[in-house]
Image: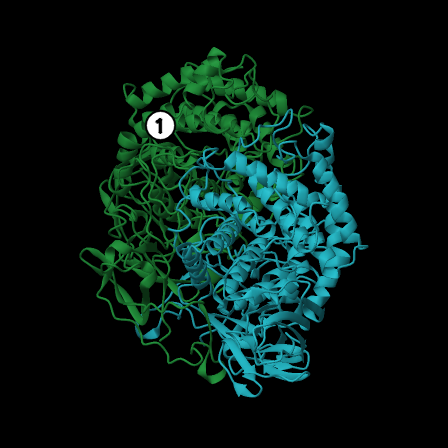
Chain colours: A green, B cyan
Amino acid sequence: MSSSTSTPTARDAVIVDPARGRLHPLGIDRVRIESGFWADRQRLNAEATQPHCLAWEQRVGWIDNFARTANGDIAGHRHGREFSDSDVYKLIEALAWEAGRTGDPETEAEAEVRRLGALVEAAQCPDGYINTQYGHEGQAPRYSDLALGHELYCFGHLIQAAVARIRTGHGDEDAIVRVARRAADHLCREFGPGARDAVCGHPEIEAGLAELARATGCPRYLEQARLFVDRRGHGTLPPIEYGPVYFQDDVPVRDAEVLRGHAVRALYLTAGAIDVAVERGDDELLEAARAQFDRALARRTYVTGGMGSHHQDEAFGEDFELPADRSYCETCAGVGAIMVAWRLLLATGDERYGDVIERTLYNVVATSMSEEGTAFFYANTLHQRTPTQQTAVDQPSPRAEAQLRAPWFEVSCCPTNVSRTLSSLAGLVATSTESGVQIHQFMTGTIHATIKGGHGADQEVEIRVDTAYPDDGRITVTIERPPAGPMDLTVRIPEWAGGATVDGARVGPGARTVTRRFRAGESVTVDLAVAPRVLAADPRVDAVRGCVAVQRGPEVLCLESVDLPRGLSVEDIELSPSFRVIDDDRGPVLVGARAIPRLDGSWPYHEVATGSAGPRTPVGAPAGAPGAALPGIRLIPYHAWANRGPSTMRVWMPVSTD
Amino acid sequence: MSSSTSTPTARDAVIVDPARGRLHPLGIDRVRIESGFWADRQRLNAEATQPHCLAWEQRVGWIDNFARTANGDIAGHRHGREFSDSDVYKLIEALAWEAGRTGDPETEAEAEVRRLGALVEAAQCPDGYINTQYGHEGQAPRYSDLALGHELYCFGHLIQAAVARIRTGHGDEDAIVRVARRAADHLCREFGPGARDAVCGHPEIEAGLAELARATGCPRYLEQARLFVDRRGHGTLPPIEYGPVYFQDDVPVRDAEVLRGHAVRALYLTAGAIDVAVERGDDELLEAARAQFDRALARRTYVTGGMGSHHQDEAFGEDFELPADRSYCETCAGVGAIMVAWRLLLATGDERYGDVIERTLYNVVATSMSEEGTAFFYANTLHQRTPTQQTAVDQPSPRAEAQLRAPWFEVSCCPTNVSRTLSSLAGLVATSTESGVQIHQFMTGTIHATIKGGHGADQEVEIRVDTAYPDDGRITVTIERPPAGPMDLTVRIPEWAGGATVDGARVGPGARTVTRRFRAGESVTVDLAVAPRVLAADPRVDAVRGCVAVQRGPEVLCLESVDLPRGLSVEDIELSPSFRVIDDDRGPVLVGARAIPRLDGSWPYHEVATGSAGPRTPVGAPAGAPGAALPGIRLIPYHAWANRGPSTMRVWMPVSTD
């Protein structure tokens, strides 16, 4: 079996590589992000986040677990939770994309991928099995805890790291590629037809194997991914406290109607199901996955794009169960939502999924990381009632709530997930078809694509994007190198951008295409109105009834107590019925807020009159005077909160009825 | 050391026996509940619940654990969670009160107490240690997991069972009394001054030891209880995921300002702290406990009296973090709140604590148990969005959410906690002082008390109460056997009873006293207006902004989907601004409800206009027409929901603004 990376389907450094679909992805070698919001974060990721993650994984012993496994003395000396191997693999993947992004073989990232790859390879068993928690002397046997042991989940992340290496130009000279191929072959033997009829309690292997099949041209891996997708939902996993819904073993993927259970598990599974559906032409499965994701967007998603309201089992709540003060919105669920949305965008061309990616990037991924790039939110609340507490900088956080961002976690899936998303971010920006180029995310930089010209021959196109987005809504798209014939230039007009124009003409949301023969240097100007917009929620979202949120461009805003007059908490604020939000030269300002008088009693419920008096008048008490009007209060992007010390914060703000 | 039950302080079959305080408790031998709401439940408890609990504890092996421990073959054969011993003890306590309530030595309850007592005694180690999970060959050593092992928690419940036996007339002829005395002596050696400087991760031993000191007159137990109370909050317990706040080890009891962390732990600890404070005349500690409970009532309590909004760690949320659809309101926290409130009522005479007991009895304790007495809610949600699922009747529930009441749980603390509360319920009804009798809870039956007459001599008083409460608000109190001189007859007027009268005269809430020389057979008539009252919440309770709840007498009402026109869920309902609630001859009816038009989109957030148009007008869409008016809808007591098959339900109902 050839292990060459050159296969019929491999195409550039793309982050997902479907064999069919409406849009063809453009890899991180074809799209360069040069400056602005995301370029700054990519730089922070390379210079601060990745060295930080590496230092922590060394410090807490998760890297050393591989060395001990290789040396045969892991039992009794292992550090970290049962899935800590996966965090090493995610860091390798992040470094692999980073090395691929710069293209420089002398980078620190490339050196670290090689060093870590050698450590991992030394720990692999001769039959391809690799895990530092199971199967060695003094440890529990392999596959003895499929429900919660995370072994196949770890394999999945290992394989994703190898796929990143293959797509950035590596092959069997690379240790991680060799390890992943051997591991995948092992899995196909152990879990193939006629072998163990089982799945892993945490999906991830499905997308990993499907992508490895794409990257290597080996259909056996795709078939194994299909088996895992089809087996789930038939109750092969043992009972656990949260029930089979926790790991989506309650209903087969193609029969389910909505995302449910543990949010990250549900999203990773959906990504894998889409990969399998696309490769196999299984439109029924694709439609089932799409419908589940759509329904989750319509009923189980926060205004930030965050998913998951249950802390207990890190799960989706019921429809419209979206409490702001108990939003879990795990950072990794945001990454999972982007994985799903990107796959659906490629498959369907529906720019609603481009909207999902934008919303989640600006309001979940960007929120997780601190301004310094070395601390993270694991969960992303939309309402912080009590001042956030300082987090110890020198020890892993137990995923504690109500704290500032933490440098590391006992369960530290999120930092490396953010890092791999940032390293590979250029892969989400644009796509091509035979007739043109589609721009989904707005970042200053260049896009190279190969399209068919008027004569059916491949033609290289170069496009330059200039913008101060999201601060400003103007995006200038310049065709530096046009094709010989006409070209479709498509831009996503976000759902929020009422009044958007393309070259001065009003356009509605969705994919908007300009088709013409472009001259070199000719520009198309897109204007998106980024003025603050006030939002309300479906009345079934009980938790924010009578409240509004504010969004400016793609950024959801929030009220943070450091912007309030001294001594006030966000709990003390309400908006008068005539409030408004304006943009001054420093950004959005809330006008018409007032302080709620504190009326502390011994019981927080009071009788009210009904009938013509309406239910708001307390019985036996004069209506309270409205609170004191406050001067204009600055609103900040939600992602920027908790960078100025302990504070309270809220996205949804109550509006007084009088 | 004498183990006689006759001590200077022992007084009747009281459920708590403080040495000082404003009010003297009257035991279950002095107060008889004869008919009505609670008599029905006491009968159900005796005839259905207790045999049910006994059968389940046998079936799941928790009782057998004691036999195996006695036989030396417990290791490897133990059933249940690490704290299952405590559920056997709580059942013994429930049976002990039940045997004491009837006073009949031939009851099944008495026979079971003896049988179980013998089993438990056989399992006790010679040094007094007793636990089926620790310390035997092949098990983890004693006290090797104080954070989560629950050993002292189990001791506490063992001791409470023994206290129930002592107060219902038993002494060292009773196995449980002997076992508890030996266990308490063991604990004083192991954890006394100069020995282990440690506490248990789950409070309960504090109240147990203080009560055993009262029941036996042995001050050493009180001193040990004091040590446990004072040691907590100094970080002696090891770190756990939820932090030291989970078991109240974050702040010393006398320095804390509010109940926090795991709700049952917080409430049991507070009960123990009050016992210690009262016995030792430590008013600072008493005041600290009272202030914490008061603040929890003002900011961290549901309208039902339920406490705890976090599922993850079964904990109190932040102030005003009280989501209806994620209310945890563990049944055991309700029992804990009653334990605390009763102690504070005895200490202070403040009838606000009588209100707490009433609210929690009717809306938490009564809610937990099914109409048949053989199924229970562990958590008590105030809003069920999706139809409750049927629960398997033949296997323990994993404490699953969104289900009908379950027959048993893997963690089954609640059923026996409800049972012991019901068996001993008469002990919460009335108290005495030198000058009179105080009636706190309204139930048809008789009260016997001994007061000082005009000449300072003990005089027996007999009082009869007749009422159809809570359906009807009239309570007739008849002095069947008056004292020779004048007597104070005090009744609690609930905080909700605006317009209440005593013998026709308007009275406000609180303790209302009639002082006079009563003739035999003379009555005092109390009228409480139980007409439905509409309630709103403090605006800081974000989760129910713009909603109302309805209470009728002490019962919080709810809307259950089985009372709606076919096909509607409670999610589909809103109230018009002019809605009202009336009482017809079958009970409360909601008039003015309407169906919300379902407006399903792909994203549940929409832009609204601001300024003079107000924030409720969607941008670019005509205001939706109000939904179709519905006929009057029956409201039912919250405690009665989920007895008619799967349904949706809500306590807080949204009121439209137009």
Query: Left or right of A543: which side holds A234?
Result: right
**Image quadrant assignment for residue A249:** top right
Q: Residue at x 28, y 31 (%)?
A: A48
Task: In the displayed orientation, state which residue is furthest to the bottom.
Answer: B504
Mark 1 is surrounded, within 10 Å at the Cα level, by few (under 14), some (14 to 19) or many (20 or more) other residues, namely many
Give residue B527's position: percent from left, percent from top: 59, 82
Q: Amino acid at mark 1?
A: Trp
Marked residue chain, label 1: A
Give residue A121's position: percent from left, percent from top: 46, 15
Give residue B357's position: percent from left, percent from top: 56, 64
The quadrant the N terminus of chain B occupies is top right
| Residue nearer the viewer, B562 or A490 | B562
Task: In the displayed orientation, state which residue is furthest to the right.
Answer: B106
Dot 1 corresponds to which residue?
Answer: A56
The quadrant the C terminus of chain B occupies is bottom left
Note whether residue B38 is visible. Answer: yes
Query: Left or right of B281: which side holds B47?
Result: right
Q: Is residue A124 above or below residue B94?
A: above
Note whether residue A302 is visible. Answer: no
| Residue nearer the viewer, A58 or A260 | A58
**Image quadrant assignment for residue A392:** top left
